[in-house]
Each structure stands twice: as C-alpha cells, then as structure tokens.
Amino acid sequence: MKKIIPILLTILSLILFETLIAKNEQHLATGQSIYVSLAPADPRALLQGDYMALRYNLNFVGAIVQAPWGALPLAYVLVDSQRRVLKTSFKQDILLGQGRVYPLQLKMGHGERPFPASDSYFFAEGLAGCYEQARFALFKVSAEGKPLLADLVNEQLQPLNCEAQQKWQNGARDEQ
C-alpha cells in the first residue's frame, strides 16, 4: 500500500497539470484577441535574466476603482477595428455606443495602476534586442473577461518571432 500512494499522487498531479494546460490551450484557441499598447520598459533583470517588465498604456476613463484585497476588478475596454484598446473604464456604460466593448479582468499592482494578466514576460537569453521592438501585448480574452497573454507584437500587430533567432535552439554553436 505504501508503494501505491506515491504512484497515485503522481498520476493525480499529472492529470491536474494536463487539465490546466488543456484549459489554457482552449482559452488561447477560443478567446477574443485584443491588443494593449505597451509603454517602454527595461528588458533585463540582473537576478532573473532576460525578461521584459510589461507596462501598459491603458487610457482609463473615469475613476480607477480600488478593488478589495485579493479581488480582481472587472474593467471594460473599447477597441478599434484592429482590436487595439483605445479606452478603459470600470463602468461599461461610459464606453457603450462608442464601438466594440469587451470585459477585462485586471490585477492590482502594489500601489500601481491595474494591469491585465501579467506584468512581466520572460524569454531566452540574448533576445532582448528583438523584444525591444514589442509595441503591443496580444491577449486572448474569454467571454467573462479573463485575459491570457498570448504574445508580444510589433507596431503592425505582427508577431516578433524572436524564438526563431535562438541559434542554440537550432543546433548552431557560437563561433568565437
């Protein structure tokens, strides 16, 4: 019996993780795409390696609502024809009649403005120059407004394809 318990726990863990992965894959496949403009950020951390601290240009209309600790505030975003976020409000009626509006769950930073899903984006070492070209964050948003960061894109809303620049991934060696 003692040998079966670790095996059962391992199987249950694998099932749980596979379920979470499948749920996120479904979210990416079925969520509505919206693009949130990025503000300039430093793409390197001494202790964490290469990453981009994501800061969003969310143009809030009306007052920013302080959500209770641990609660995710629900905002509404107005998007243009290319689904780029133009305005954000905590009251849907402020944006109605101006165009397409989507709900968007936000997270509250430590004394900062609210942000969607993630405030950092990690990538392989040596790709900081490529990721500096990012101008928008592509989010897949569920009908309930839950955002999932899908990619970083350029000014034309095209993927950066930075991973294709990883020489080590393609089997190439540094020639020095």
Image: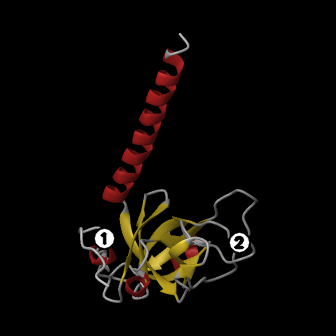
| Between 166 and 40, the one nearer to me in the picture | 166
57 w.r.t. 28: above or below: below
Residue 153: image x %, image y %?
Answer: 36, 80
State whether residue 94 appears in this view: no
Residue 56: image x %, image y %?
Answer: 54, 81
Q: Which residue is mark 2?
A: 65
Q: Which mark is residue 15?
A: none
State whether residue 17 appears in this view: yes
At label 2, counting other C-alpha atoms closer than 10 Å, the crowd grade (few under 14, some 14-19, many 20 or more) is some
Q: Secondary structure at mark 2?
A: loop
The quarter of the rendered structure image containing the C terminus is bottom left
| Between 156 and 143, the one nearer to me in the picture | 156
Q: What residue occupies the far front of the structure in this picture?
A: 176
132 w.r.t. 150: above or below: below
Please state which amino acid type lies under the numbered disc 2. Val
42 w.r.t. 65: above or below: below
| Between 75 and 1, the one nearer to me in the picture | 1
For the point 36% across and 69% down, which residue is it? 33
Please state which amino acid type lies under the numbered disc 1. Trp
| Between 111 and 123, the one nearer to me in the picture | 123
